[in-house]
Amino acid sequence: MTTATQTLDARGLNCPLPILRTKKALNTLSAGDTLEVRASDPGSVKDMQAFCQQTGNELVSANDANGEYAFLIRKS
């Protein structure tokens, strides 16, 4: 299991704010660092997948538990 370098709480935010905050947080990290993002917006599942594909970052994991979504992203 990978431990996150940084955690971002995007719960309560709707599209596009979780992606914008994720992008801003990733800009502060070094290549290989990981960012854990917690979100409550169901649209964030597809948004995070598309964001990682477009930016070249790796979506290490995506989990859904009781309407809360957790993503682990490794910066490329």
Image (cartoon, rainbow, N blue to C red):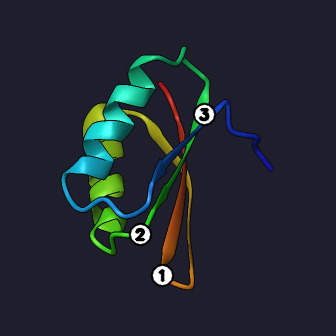
> Mark 3 packing: few (<14 Cα in 10 Å), some, or many (20+)?
many
**Residue drawn at (54%, 14%), measured in percent from left and top?**
30
Above or below — where is 9 with respect to 76?
below
15 sits left or right of 12 in the view: left
| Residue labelled with disc 2 | 40
Mark 2 is on which residue type?
Ser
Residue 3: quadrant of the picture = top right
Q: Position of residue 63 (x, y in %)?
A: 57, 69
Secondary structure state at the residue bearing disc 3: strand
> Mark 1 packing: few (<14 Cα in 10 Å), some, or many (20+)?
few
Query: Residue pushed farthest front?
Result: 12
Residue 52: quadrant of the picture = top left
| Residue labelled with disc 1 | 67
Q: CA distance from mark 2 to mark 3?
A: 20 Å
- Residue nearer the viewer, 53 or 46: 46
| Residue labelled with disc 3 | 34
Mark 1 is on which residue type?
Gly
Q: Are marks 1 and 2 in contact (CB under 8 Å)?
A: yes
Q: Position of residue 60 (x, y in %)?
A: 58, 49
Q: CA distance from mark 3 to mark 1?
A: 23 Å
